[in-house]
Each structure stands twice: as C-alpha cells, then as structure tokens.
Image (tube, grey):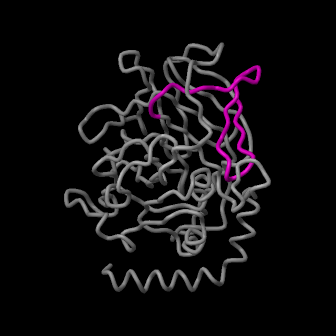
Amino acid sequence: MNVDEGRRARARRARTTAVLLAAVAAAALAAGCTSGRESGGDGRGRPTRPAGHTGPVLAVKIDNVPPARPQTGLEAADVVYTEQVEGGLSRLMAVYATRLPPVVGPVRSARESDLELLRQFDRPTLAFSGAQRKLLPLIDAAPLSARTPDDTPGAYFRETGRAAPHNLYLRPGRLLGSPPGANALTTGFRYGPAPAGGRPETSRTVRYPAARFTFTWSATRHGWQVAMDGRPTVAADGKPVTPATVVVQHVKVRASRLHDVLGSRTPYTETVGSGKAEVLRDGRAFDVTWKRPRAADGTRFTAAGGAPADFARGQVWVVLTDAP
C-alpha cells in the first residue's frame, strides 16, 4: 500500500471510529478503566508513572507459527507475553523498554485483548501488521500509539527469503528514537530475592489447543530455555532464548465478539481480575496468586503468606493460559 492509500485508509478508520465511540467507552469501563480518584490513575484514566519515566514502551505483535521461526529480536525484549489466538494457535507480544534491537519480527496482526493487556503502560507504541476490520476503531480509540506498515511504511520491510505473511519485519529505531528505560515497565512486577519455599522444578510445559511451550531450567545459563511446539526457541544468531523468570498465569480465555475470515471466534484473554499463577525462577517453582484490579493497574504477584513474589532480574515470559 502506498502513502496516499495509507492516508485514505486512516480517514476511513477515523470515520468509523466516530460511529463506535459510545461502544468503545462502554467496553473500556467494563475492562476496568479508572479515574484519578482511584489507585493507579492520574485523573485521565492513565496509570501513574514513577519519576524517571522517559517515554513509551514498544510492544510488537510477533508471529509464532513454525514458518515464522526463528524470530528476530525476541531475545532483546524485557517481557514476552504469550496468548492464544484462533484455531488454538499462539502469538507473542514482545515489550521493549531497556534496549531496542535493530530488527524485530515477523510482525503480525493485533487482537482485541491486546488493548486491555497494554493499558498497564503509559500510551505504549504498538507495532502490528493490521487487525480485523471491526477492531480497528477500538485500536484508534485506545490510549496507545498504533503503528502499522500503512502508517509508517519506512519502519517496516519484507524479508525476501521468507513467504508472506511471515516475512514482515520492523526496525524499532524508526518508531522510537531511543529505549525509554526500565521505569517505563509499569507492569507491577518486582525483582529481588526468591520468595521463601517453592519446590525444585527443571521443566514445565504449558499447552494451548494447537500449541505448546516448554521451559527447561539451565543452571549454566541461569535461565529457562524455551521450546515451542517441541523445538528449541533460538534467536536469529542461533543462541537459545533463555528468560530468567517464567510466569504461568491462569486467566479466563473466552470467545470475543470478533472472528477471523473463516468464521472462527477470536479468543479474548482477560488480564484484569485475579487468579492463580506459578513463578518459575532459579530452578524452582513458586505457587502464587495474581491480582490486577483495573486495566490501568499493573499485575501484582503474591506468594504464600502475603509477601510479594519477586522475579529474577532479566527477561520475563508470561504465559497466559486458560484457568483449569
């Protein structure tokens, strides 16, 4: 799509947005929007930010089917969320704050529940390849900066060695001039010594209907080596992706109002609420609870006895999986 076509597409989206603003407002309230009189707000429904916050995080929707692997730039993310999409498959949301790799991808389309997930950040930049037509007005109305190949074509390119749609890549430096820093990671995560207790654990597998993630503890790398669908997850240079902490967060996954071109309902992953989780770090597993009262709040993880469940410093993977 050329620049003129991109402008016309944005104009059509703006007109559609005006028609659906009332529905968007109602959905936002249901998702837990907050005012400044409630904890976590600044008076305009945005999260309160600590001193030293220098700008928005970059969130990138990343393809995760076999033809899309190995992904590029995944190892540089501060947080990687996994989510279920149509057909029981999986997709990733990589969040960058402390460093921006030269290239990230393959980039794919957004989902409705991404908007709720990203409310915990202050006007994040969301990079994605597109979205279902009825979702576009909701993205336009959300408190984020949406960046697609239509809006910023110079930030994206097609890799000639791969087949579409698994060949769209992003140059993050063309969206953000510099990384905003760790203070932009307003997820509610805490980092520090491991909680008391726990149990030894060297491997954990989480299954979606048509995908699975396995995390195997590596004492030499002091992290959890990731495998997806039974194959090791590696960076573009062949090095294993090894987060320091893995969180298996049990959430409600329900059918959304939207569907794909085949008529399959899009799963909606609810990340506001509370429930159970397991924190994997240092070769041990800790049973915890999670709580995120409002969409603008971060998620708090609490160990037995009420103490905060601190994470190991380094990359965190959050596997959002349907509660049993």
Quadrant assignment for the N terminus: bottom left
Q: Position of residue 80 (x, y in %)?
A: 48, 42
Q: Residue at x 32, y 55 (%)?
A: 173
State the extent of the magenta-drawn residues as a range: 289-315
Q: Nearer the viewer, residue 36 or 75?
A: 36
Residue 305, placed above or below residue 56: above
Number of numbered labels in the structure image: 0
Q: Main secondary structure of the magenta part?
A: loop
Q: Position of residue 62 (x, y in %)?
A: 41, 52
Q: Nearer the viewer, residue 133 or 294?
A: 294
Q: Position of residue 155 (x, y in %)?
A: 31, 64
Q: Residue at x 44, y 48 (%)?
A: 180
Q: Nearer the viewer, residue 93 or 175?
A: 175
Residue 225, placed above or below residue 118: above
Quadrant assignment for the C terminus: top right
Q: Is 275 colored magenta in this rendering?
A: no
Residue furthest to the front: 51
Residue furthest to the right: 37
Q: Is 306 colored magenta in this rendering?
A: yes
Q: Residue at x 72, y 39 (%)?
A: 291
Residue 286 in which image quadrant: top right
Residue 270, placed above or below residue 188: below
Left or right of 187, for residue 232: left
Q: Position of residue 255 (x, y in %)?
A: 66, 59
Left or right of 161, for residue 204: right
Q: Residue at x 70, y 48 (%)?
A: 40
